[in-house]
Image (cartoon, rainbow, N blue to C red):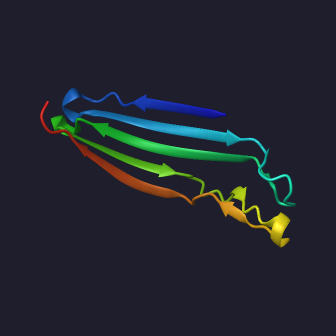
Amino acid sequence: MTLGASYILPLPDFVGHVSLGAIYVHTAKQLANEVSPIGVMPATDLLNLNVNWADAFGSPGDLAFFVTNVTNAIYPVNVGGSYASAGFDGYYMAPPRMWGFRLRYSFGE
């Protein structure tokens, strides 16, 4: 299940268009590998946030800030698949919290 929301701040036009966004993703427990004893992935909840500023002070530039995995949840997303042949297995883990900036500049009209 994915839920997303965005709110546009009521700012004067000369400031530009600023929006705040959030995306929540719930993934139910699921089978990744039926042979492996660790092949069932747990249910997970993930929250991502972003701030977008378009036409910043009337410029042709847009700025954005984002954070993924806000709660820094640690969870597996898959298993290695070596249990049947090697007798042991391991997890592939989800990425940790990440944040960053984006800048976009439009040339011409």
Q: Residue at x 58, y 45 (%)?
A: 47
- Quadrant position of the C terminus in the picture: top left
- Quadrant position of the N terminus in the picture: top right
Q: Position of residue 96 (x, y in %)?
A: 57, 60
For residue 19, above or below residue 101:
above
Most extreme residue toward the front, as rendered? 85
Q: Residue at x 18, y 31 (%)?
A: 14
Count of number-bearing discs? 0
Instruction: Please indicate whether residue 69 sits to the left or right of residue 44 in the image.
Output: left
Residue closest to the eye, 48 or 9: 48
Instruction: Please indicate whether residue 109 sits to the left or right of residue 37 in the image.
Output: left
Q: Position of residue 72 (x, y in %)?
A: 60, 58
Residue closest to the eye, 14 or 74: 74
Q: Position of residue 50 (x, y in %)?
A: 44, 43
Residue closest to the eye, 77 or 21: 77
Instruction: Please indicate whether residue 57 sits to the left or right of residue 88 in the image.
Output: left
Instruction: Give the quarter of the image for residue 59.
Output: top left
Residue closest to the eye, 4 or 7: 4
Instruction: Give the quarter of the image for residue 77.
Output: bottom right
Q: Residue at x 80, y 53 (%)?
A: 33
Instruction: Give the quarter of the image for residue 53.
Output: top left
